[in-house]
Image (cartoon, rainbow, N blue to C red):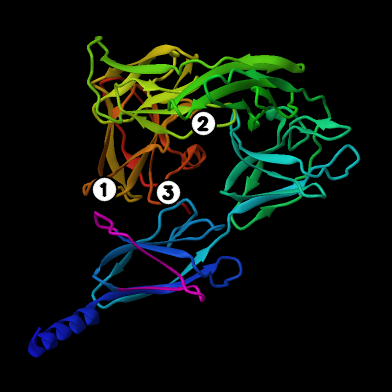
Amino acid sequence: MSQAAQKTFLAALAAASLHAAAIRGMVVENQSGYPLARATVMLETVQNPPDPKSLRTNLSGIFEFTGLPAGTYRISAAKLGFAPVQYGQKRWFSPGMPIALSAGDTADLTIRMPRYGGISGTVFDENDVGLPDHEVGVYTNTRPPRLLAHAPTDDRGVYRLGSLRPGKYLIRSLAKSYDDESYLPTFYGDSPLVDEAHAIEVKLDEEVEHMDFHPAPGRLFTISGRINTIQGSPVVTLSSDTGTEMATIDGQGNFTFKPVAPGQYELLGVVTSERARSRWAAFQTITVDRDLSSLYLNPSALPTVQFDFVDTAGHPVTMPEGSVMLRRKEPAAEGQTQDVKAPDAITLLPGRWEVAVKPASTYSAVKFEPGDSAGRADGWNEIVLPQGSKTTARFVLSLQPATIAGMVKNPNGEALAGVPVFVEPYDLEPRKRIEPMRWVIADAQGHYQVSGLAAGAYRLLASFDYEMPDSEQMAAADAKTVQVEDGARATLDLAEFVIH
């Protein structure tokens, strides 16, 4: 490059830098105001594609994005142990406020990060003496409750469960056997029954303390048996609503679990052959009301599922790849959701599974076989797969699904553009719903349309104040309800909801 060309390039670079925008600021702990070092700060444009950039704050909690073109940006921050934050959000569940920059502008921000909530207390025996090394679990306040995490008590019986989002939770001690006493799983409120459990409300930056309770004394039972290991290396697990335990297994395939409380359990044995690159499995549901010492697991071929799709007239329907989702269902929680290449057959472990068709604008699931013919099929549908079985899972699809459309208006009755409209399947059981709920954006004239809906009741909310509302927030916002029929179009105008 010639000297003249170099001067021209440097002058152009200086001119571009002169007119470039910047966003700088500091990330601090919400309660103390102390700077947070090594927090991750993310910047992305509101335009599509978002073009994200990220960096970490320095030891003084300072960050700086320079050389930005004029535009509109969103800023967020994350750090282990803290709730993620979007700059300018009204509530922890609200989207952030975009920042508009002209050429040469500089925005100076302070991002305050709250800590997650926590629950702590003491697990006492009958004489109010703390019980050491006693597992305590935290559950969703749902029916049935879903285990989220668990932690042991310390030497004084004190437990702490952290990293909790705002909401209501149930706390439960797990079964525990000491040398001279054993205790049954017991909810906070000193009850073994979930309907008598006391829910605990958690907020950001707060620790709910002194959630003390007394596990109920009772007899625990032993579970042991043998698994046929001739084909390879075995693993045996026992699942209940308090979680999943792994058995100890000797060289002859004899397995033993630590003592458990009375109740319903699922027993799964899997044998893997690395040489043959194959797996076999055995599955049983058992009722534990006494010691069980002679259980026998004889693994066989894994079950297979073939997916089939027809329209309401019984004609085959060709589905795109990845249009089916499935997850393993265990007593304590649902497994990780995975996509299936439909309609190919798939091999799975024996036991309980849930399958669903991904929502789309051109069809809706109206029936599932085998399944509950009385319930809606556009959510999760349960199937039970015995070992070695071959099952056909059939979805009946409506190719003329329902539609809900309307206009979003501000408090003055004027059309409101760009507002998110959230759609909740109101009469679909919460445990069967596909998360997150569906949503669309109102167009420049304030019109919205949601297609691909199965017949049923839906609740709708238009608001800039939620990133993704849950059922309680939909109810608190007085979301509107509408009933739709298959193939029909319902009209529902919405007023923007604003959190005050």
For marks 1 and 2, the one nearer the N-term is 2
Position in image of residue 347 (x %, y %): 40, 22
Residue type at numbered disc 1: Ala
Circle 3 residues within 10 Å: few <14, some 14–19, many ≥20: many
Q: Is residue 2 magenta?
A: no
At x 33% / y 21%, what residue is drawn? 365
**Which residue is label 1 attached to?**
415
At x 28% / y 31%, what residue is drawn? 360
With 391 as the anchor, is 68 left or right in this view? Answer: left
- Measure the alpha-carbon separation of dots 1 and 2: 41 Å
- Measure the alpha-carbon separation of dots 2 and 3: 26 Å
Marking on residue 334:
2
Closest to the observer, 194 or 342: 342
At x 88% / y 44%, what residue is drawn? 129
Which stretch is magenta?
46-66
Q: Secondary structure at mark 2?
A: loop
Marking on residue 466:
3
Asked whether disc 2 touches disc 3, contact meaning CB atoms under 8 Å apart, the reply is no
- Measure the alpha-carbon separation of dots 1 and 3: 19 Å
